Amino acid sequence: MNSKLVTLQAFPMFLSLFSIGFSSLMGFATHHFYVSKTIMNYTPDKGAVEVTMRFFTDDLEKAMGVFTSSDFKVNASDIAASQLVADYVERHFRASVNGKAVHCSWVGMEAEADLTYCYLEISVGEPIQTIEVVNHALMEVFPEQQNIVDFSALSTTQTAILVKGSSQHTFSR
């Protein structure tokens, strides 16, 4: 009978610890992660690198609001909005191939409920030995932003995580 008494007396303390731990976990569950994903696929026979940038739409809209100094809503079918996103991406994403700056051509964008996809293409006239990427998109709005970049060439994928203060990486083949 004493063991039941001890267990019942410890129950309020257990309940308090449980509710503190549970509320802490709930805080983590609602934490927003600031991350984007860029996939770069090199196709030697096309002489091009196809680039897909994937952003959370609400994060991109916030950054675009700062960029345009207005309330901005992503709308892939609106040519003016698409051009503004292209301008933003051009300002925040650059590449160099074999030490030479290259032009990233805007192909277009698609928007879903939560994600926005931006498509670019980089024409390269020579085999890639190195490709340097600078990607500081969204970092002006979210200091903890992480831009994950995958570079794939000839069945090999390399990954870099770019953060504020370290937003460039050189991939070597």
Image: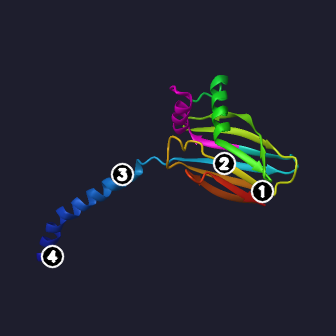
Per the rendering, the mark at residue 26 is 3
Q: Earlier in the sequence, mark 4 or mark 1?
A: 4
- Magenta-tinted stretch: 52-73
Q: Earlier in the sequence, mark 2 or mark 4?
A: 4
- The residues bearing labels 1 and 3 have C-alpha atoms spaced at a distance of 44 Å
Q: Nearer the viewer, residue 103 or 81?
A: 103
**Residue pointed to by mark 4:** 3
| Discs 3, 2 touching: Cβ within 8 Å | no
> Where residue 100 sits: x, y (%)?
79, 49
* Left/right of residue 158 with respect to residue 20 in the rendered view: right
Q: Nearer the viewer, mark 1 or mark 3?
A: 1
Q: Is residue 118 above or below residue 158?
A: above
Q: Is residue 145 above or below residue 91?
A: below
Picture quarter containing residue 94?
top right
User: Quarter of the image containing the N terminus?
Assistant: bottom left
Was residue 72 drawn as part of the magenta stretch in this picture? Answer: yes
Was residue 129 drawn as part of the magenta stretch in this picture? Answer: no
Q: Give the SS element for disc 1.
A: strand
Identity, as a three-letter code, of the amino acid under mark 1: Thr
Identity, as a three-letter code, of the amino acid under mark 2: Val
